[in-house]
Structures are given as structure tokens and as C-alpha cells.
């Protein structure tokens, strides 16, 4: 169910409706919009009695939401969600494109700073790097853990980049939430429901990657798990799905971008690095992602990819990243977007 408040409803009236919903034994999820606030209701097993709610001051109407992903649906919130970050112009969603760049893994302080300086100078707003690495082989590099988080915090202080890194389990989630600006939930954990619910109890943005074989509805239902716990700052990320093809690592499904945007208000990014797995495919797919309407790009960059401890073949060089940014900047106006650049150049050069 969804309670739609009148445009002139006061904060006190909105709170009174939330209190009434809670007294009925359900959970209230107020979602402010540009014109009015909608309040989603979860925890109900069937129809909620509308009469009591419709009679409350400030209520415009009470409607039924048919989709299983209630809070992620445009039925609940028509306006696009924009995830912003205090003290910075960086944002994910809206007209401004978000660019997240950095190595697959933080390997050392020198390596991380060398890459961060170059992606910042090219105009990235976010720095990605793995501290905890879920690898196919137990003998592969597993990440530096807390040391990597501290290195990335220093990068944020030095260059003003917001930090995005992955939590792989309940134990690492608390550490990532303490040090990072965005908590990433990887493809392998998209349906790790206990982890999703714990991430939902955080008050920090969560970047949720699509699972290897997840349908659109499964993807949105995973986001719903996070939102049902009260965290509405969820960012989706398409990173390719597993198919019969063998010319790329995965199959990049750009058709999900407009499909998500039709059904959900949540922002969606595209990761062409994990989708293709091949350096020479990343720039073309990044261009295509922006043209398809994606809210931004998440890409792996390494200054010495042949020496990388993970994902070297799918990491582009800093010069290629700068070229990608130039190309995206030219495409952005065609899809009514803009790409802010130059914010971090002075810090990177200093």
C-alpha cells in the first residue's frame, strides 16, 4: 500500500500518518518527492484498511501497489532518486553523470595514489578499489583489508574523491561502512539476503551489482531488501550476465538500463570492465552505456595492468580513461546529461 500526501502536507501531518501506520503493526517508509511525499507501507500480509488512513489530515489518497518491489517502484516515487554526498558536488542520479574509477584491488599505497591522481585529474568523482576480494580461487590475492580502507581514506582527503568499495560478508560490512562513502554489494552477494538486510540498516549509500544470472525483477527485489530496512539510497549497477558467449567475459545487457528506468526511480550505473573482461572492449561499451541512458560508469583503471594482482586484462590505462572521459563528455549532451570535470585537477596536480 501507498499513502500519497497532499502537496501542502506539513511535516507534522506526515509524521502522524507514519505513527498511525506503525500503530497498526506495519512499517512506514516516507519517501519525499519534488511535489509531495509518499509513504510506503510494508509488513502487511494483505490489504490495509484504507478508511482510517484516508481520514488523516494531509492525506490525498491511499493506493494499492501491485509490484512486489514496492519501495523501488515508480508507483511509490515518480521522481528519480539522486544520491548526494555532503561537502561535495558529487552525486549519483539526475542530470549529472557519475564516474567511478580505480583498480580492482588496492595493492599498495604507491599503486593506489598513482592511479587516484590520474583518474582525479581526468575528472572522476569517485574512486573504487577492492579491500576485501571475493576470488574464484582461494589462493588468489584476497585484498589488504583494513590497510586498504585506510589508504583509500587518505586518497579521499588528498583528492576529494568519494570512496566506493565492496563488503563481502557481515564482518567486512561494518569496516567498509566506517571508512567508505558507498558500500558495494557484489554480484555474487546480490541474493545474500542477510547481508542485504544488514546493509539496509546502515545509513550509507549502497551500490548493488546485478547477479550473474539475475532477472530484472530479482535485481529490483534485492534492492527492495535493502530499502525495506530503511535505507533508500540504493544505486544499481549492470555488470554483465552469464550467457553462451565466449568472446567476452560476460554479456553486457544494456537493455536493462531503460527497463529499470521505466519501472524504478533508483539510479543505474554500468560496469563495462566486468561485463567485457577485455581492455579493448571497455571504451566502446562505456560510450554505448551513456548513450543508453545510464547514470554513470564504473570502470577499472590501473597504471601497470600487466603487473596487477587481479583483473589486469580488463583494466584500462589512465590515458585510455582520459580518452573515455573526453568521449563521454561529447555524448552526454545528446542524452540531456552533463559531465562535470576539473573539480579535482588542482588537487591532483598539487
Image (cartoon, rainbow, N blue to C red):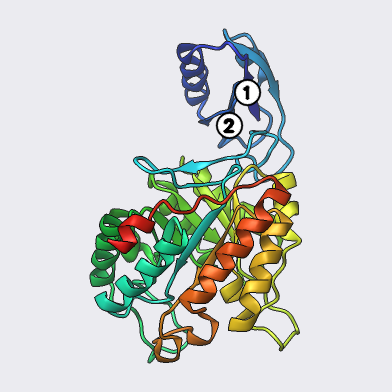
From the viewer's side, name the closer residue of 117 and 35.
117
Crowd rating for badge 2 (residues with CA inside 10 Å; few <14, some 14–19, many 20+): many
Q: Quadrant location of residue 135?
A: bottom left
SS at badge 2:
strand
Residue 9, x across and y down, in percent: 55, 12
For residue 291, side relative to residue 235 (left or right): right
Along the polypeptide, which appears first: circle 1 or circle 2?
1
Question: Which numbered circle lies on residue 3?
Answer: 1
Residue 54, x across and y down, in percent: 65, 13
Crowd rating for badge 1 (residues with CA inside 10 Å; few <14, some 14–19, many 20+): many
Residue 78, x across and y down, in percent: 67, 33
Residue drawn at the location 58% of the way across and 31% of the way down = 41
Q: From where the camera sits, is residue 320 visible? A: yes
SS at badge 1:
strand
- Above or below — where is 219 with respect to 11? below
C-alpha gap between disc 1 and disc 2: 8 Å
The quadrant the N terminus occupies is top right
Q: Quadrant location of residue 218?
A: bottom right
Q: From where the camera sits, is residue 232 visible? A: no
For residue 255, side relative to residue 140 (left or right): right
For residue 219, side relative to residue 202 (left or right): right
Query: Disc 2 marks which residue?
Result: 41
Q: Are marks 1 and 2 in contact (CB under 8 Å)?
A: yes
The quadrant the C terminus occupies is bottom left
From the viewer's side, name the closer residue of 47 and 174.
174
- Above or below — where is 265 with respect to 332? above
Residue drawn at the location 36% of the way across and 62% of the way down = 170
Residue drawn at the location 63% of the way across and 23% of the way down = 3
Amino acid at each position: 500500500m501507498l499513502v500519497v500526501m497532499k502537496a501542502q502536507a506539513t511535516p507534522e501531518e506526515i509524521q502522524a500518518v507514519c505513527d498511525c501506520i506503525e500503530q497498526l503493526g506495519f512499517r512506514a517508509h516516507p519517501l519525499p518527492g519534488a511535489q509531495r511525499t509518499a509513504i510506503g507501507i510494508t509488513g502487511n500480509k494483505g490489504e490495509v484498511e484504507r478508511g482510517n488512513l484516508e481520514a488523516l489530515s494531509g492525506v490525498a489518497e491511499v493506493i494499492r501497489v501491485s509490484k512486489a518491489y514496492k519501495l523501488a517502484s515508480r508507483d511509490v516515487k515518480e521522481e528519480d532518486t539522486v544520491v548526494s554526498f555532503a561537502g561535495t558536488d558529487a552525486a549519483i542520479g539526475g542530470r549529472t553523470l557519475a564516474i567511478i574509477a580505480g583498480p580492482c584491488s588496492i595493492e599498495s599505497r604507491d599503486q593506489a595514489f598513482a592511479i587516484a591522481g590520474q583518474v582525479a585529474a581526468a575528472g572522476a568523482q569517485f574512486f573504487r578499489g577492492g579491500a576485501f576480494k571475493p576470488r574464484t580461487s582461494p589462493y588468489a590475492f584476497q585484498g589488504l583489508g583494513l590497510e586498504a580502507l585506510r589508504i583509500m581514506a587518505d586518497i579521499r582527503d588528498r583528492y576529494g574523491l568519494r570512496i566506493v568499495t565492496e563488503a563481502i560478508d557481515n564482518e567486512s560490512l561494518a569496516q567498509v561502512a566506517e571508512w567508505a562513502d558507498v558500500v558495494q554489494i557484489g554480484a555474487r552477494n546480490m541474493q545474500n539476503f542477510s547481508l542485504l538486510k544488514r546493509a539496509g540498516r546502515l545509513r550509507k549509500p549502497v551500490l548493488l551489482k546485478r547477479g550473474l544470472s539475475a532477472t530484472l525483477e530479482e535485481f529490483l527485489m534485492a534492492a527492495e531488501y535493502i530499502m525495506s530496512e530503511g535505507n533508500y539510497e540504493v544505486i544499481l549497477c549492470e555488470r554483465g550476465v552469464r550467457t553462451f558467449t565466449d568472446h567476452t567475459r560476460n554479456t553486457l545487457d544494456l537493455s536493462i538500463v531503460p527497463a529499470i528506468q521505466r519501472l524504478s526511480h533508483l539510479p543505474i550505473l554500468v560496469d563495462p570492465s566486468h561485463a567485457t573482461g577485455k581492455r579493448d572492449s571497455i571504451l566502446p561499451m562505456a560510450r554505448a552505456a551513456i548513450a543508453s541512458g545510464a547514470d554513470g560508469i564504473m570502470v577499472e583503471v590501473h597504471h601497470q595492468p600487466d603487473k596487477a594482482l587481479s583483473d589486469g586484462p580488463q583494466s584500462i590505462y589512465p590515458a585510455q580513461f582520459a580518452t573515455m572521459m573526453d568521449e563521454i563528455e561529447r555524448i552526454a549532451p545528446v542524452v540531456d546529461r552533463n559531465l562535470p570535470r576539473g573539480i579535482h585537477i588542482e588537487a591532483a596536480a598539487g
